[in-house]
Image: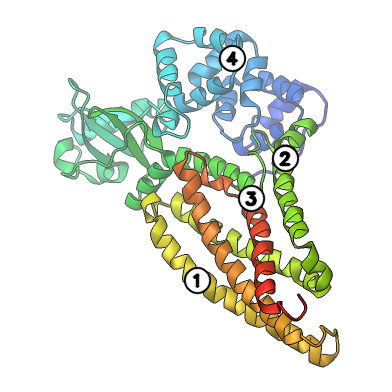
């Protein structure tokens, strides 16, 4: 693969001629590094077929804005020549009146298809499907089917999956791969060489994560989208990958305690970035203010046993860490459909003893640390150091157990009320556990240290 260096000024026509000979992925990468105005100028100078290949790449940044900047007639021809699912993605992001203008610049049939795809909710199989697939009637032979594939391959998103369809009802009868077709006798009937079993299909409203699970389970390159037994489109594995990468990126952003970015990091405006991060930070800060309130409630205890403050960071971080671990495990299990909402009690039954054991492990480490520091002379915790060690050890058991249980239940609660479980981000869990952790810590201290330090 050729190395494409960043474009830097010069004659747009000459640069476009150079780019036209490079791999389309390298061209997209080079265009993404350039200002939108220069990228648009270069796209206008590239050969039409090359421009179509570039706009067909989901990795092209600002594709709607770039196609909107081109002359209307060329933009319309580009939209018509692109794969249908990619054209629908671009139209979805276009602003008015460019969206309406471009839709009227294409044929009524294509316009109807794009609008039909846009009619499905984002994140569904219907929203990412393509209507460009290879289909044949059941009475064709292998030779005729191969001839047909040669004729239409340039206008189909994939030719590796072929579908046998009833020409009258459009009912999907069979599905088979190109390998089986090539390996069969030319004069054999299609129905005789295809597997005699119902093809794996998905409804148009199925979530893309479930579609990905099916594709993975059955090792498919594509899966037909069927409504009322009629095939209406096809979801290919590359479309699933692109969508899942996008959704995973959004989940990672949310899990980090911020809104998902809708643009690449380096192209995100300064104030847009502040807006995406500031709201969550303020919400988390307000939550952490409850920590100060909790500490104010134990002001007398802090004055009486100032040594307790030494272990507050340790206590708070341990609870937050255990909660974040549990949240991560449950969110991933929910995403992979390993567990469902009805399994909340099973998760709780697992996390409760796990939290106790993990808390006991940390508690032993905490007690050992206090004991070592006391006997080694690194720090003098006073005449009641054994009780302080017991307080830290018991508090860690309670806090880690609470953190594990809370962190595992939050995704279920959020999913139940209609929110994305990824919103149960590590910072959110840590904030919640910080406050309750202090209450648990000082409550344990009141019980163990009453009559001595308190």
Q: Is residue 46 above or below residue 320?
A: above
Q: Which residue is mark 4?
A: 75
- Asked if marks 3 and 1 touch (Cβ < 8 Å), the reply is no
Horizontally, residue 198 falls left or right of residue 49, namely left
SS under mark 3: helix
User: What whole-number distance in Å separates the C-alpha atoms at marks 2 and 4?
Assistant: 35 Å
Q: Residue at x 36, y 26 (%)?
A: 152
- Asked if marks 2 and 3 touch (Cβ < 8 Å), the reply is no
Front in this rendered view, residue 190 or 333 = 333
Q: Marks 1 and 4: which is nearer the front?
A: 1
Q: Residue at x 39, y 44 (%)?
A: 210
Front in this rendered view, residue 423 or 30 = 423
Spot occupied by residue 73 in the image (x, y as percentages of width and height): 58, 8
- In the rendering, which numbered label is found on residue 7? none
Q: Which residue is mark 2?
A: 277
Front in this rendered view, residue 24 or 132 = 132
Q: Which residue is mark 1?
A: 354
User: What whole-number distance in Å separates the C-alpha atoms at marks 1 and 4?
Assistant: 59 Å
> Which tag, 3 or 4, sits closer to the chain's start?
4
Horizontally, residue 176 falls left or right of residue 38, namely left
Q: Is residue 87 above or below residue 300?
A: above
Spot occupied by residue 92 in the image (x, y as percentages of width and height): 53, 22
User: What whole-number distance in Å separates the C-alpha atoms at marks 2 and 3?
Assistant: 14 Å
Q: How many marks?
A: 4
Q: Marks 3 and 4: which is nearer the front?
A: 3
Spot occupied by residue 250 in the image (x, y as percentages of width and height): 59, 42
Q: Which residue is mark 3?
A: 428
């Amino acid at each position: 693969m050729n190395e494409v260096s960043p474009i830097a000024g010069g004659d747009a026509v000459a640069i476009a001629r150079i780019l036209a000979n490079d791999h389309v992925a390298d061209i997209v990468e080079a265009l993404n590094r350039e200002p939108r105005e220069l990228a648009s100028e270069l796209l206008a100078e590239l050969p039409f077929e090359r421009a179509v290949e570039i706009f067909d790449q989901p990795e092209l940044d600002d594709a709607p804005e770039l196609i909107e900047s081109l002359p209307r007639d060329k933009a319309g021809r580009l939209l018509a020549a692109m794969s249908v699912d990619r054209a629908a993605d671009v139209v979805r992001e276009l602003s008015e009146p460019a969206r309406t203008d471009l839709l009227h610049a294409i044929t009524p049939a294509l316009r109807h298809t794009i609008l039909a795809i846009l009619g499905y909710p984002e994140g569904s199989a219907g929203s990412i499907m393509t209507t460009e697939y290879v289909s044949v009637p059941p009475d064709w032979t292998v030779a005729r089917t191969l001839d047909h594939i040669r004729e239409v391959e340039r206008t189909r998103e994939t030719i590796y999956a072929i579908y046998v369809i009833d020409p009258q009802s459009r009912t999907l009868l069979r599905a088979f791969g190109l390998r089986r077709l090539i390996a069969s006798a030319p004069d054999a009937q299609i129905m005789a060489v295809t597997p005699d079993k119902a093809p794996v299909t998905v409804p148009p409203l199925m979530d893309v994560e479930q579609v990905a699970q099916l594709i993975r389970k059955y090792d498919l390159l594509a899966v037909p989208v069927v409504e009322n037994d009629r095939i209406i489109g096809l979801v290919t594995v590359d479309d699933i990958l692109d969508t899942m990468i996008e959704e995973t990126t959004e989940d990672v952003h949310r899990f980090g305690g911020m809104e998902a970015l809708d643009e690449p990091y380096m192209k995100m405006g300064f104030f847009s970035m502040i807006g995406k991060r500031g709201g969550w930070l303020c919400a988390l800060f307000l939550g952490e203010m409850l920590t100060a309130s909790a500490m104010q409630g134990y002001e007398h205890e802090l004055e009486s046993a100032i040594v307790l403050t030494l272990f507050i960071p340790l206590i708070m971080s341990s609870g937050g860490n255990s909660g974040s671990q549990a949240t991560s495990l449950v969110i991933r299990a929910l995403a992979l459909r390993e567990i469902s909402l009805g399994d909340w009690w099973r998760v709780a039954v697992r996390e409760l003893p796990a939290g106790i054991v993990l808390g006991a492990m940390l508690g032993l480490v905490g007690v050992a640390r206090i004991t070592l520091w006391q006997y080694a002379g690194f720090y003098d915790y006073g005449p009641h150091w054994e009780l302080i060690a017991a307080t830290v050890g018991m508090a860690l058991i309670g806090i880690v157990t609470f953190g594990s249980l809370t962190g595992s239940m939050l995704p279920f609660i959020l999913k139940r009320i209609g929110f994305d479980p990824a919103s149960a981000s590590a910072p959110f869990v840590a904030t919640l556990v910080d406050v309750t952790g202090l209450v648990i810590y000082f409550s344990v201290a009141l019980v163990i240290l009453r009559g001595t330090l308190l």
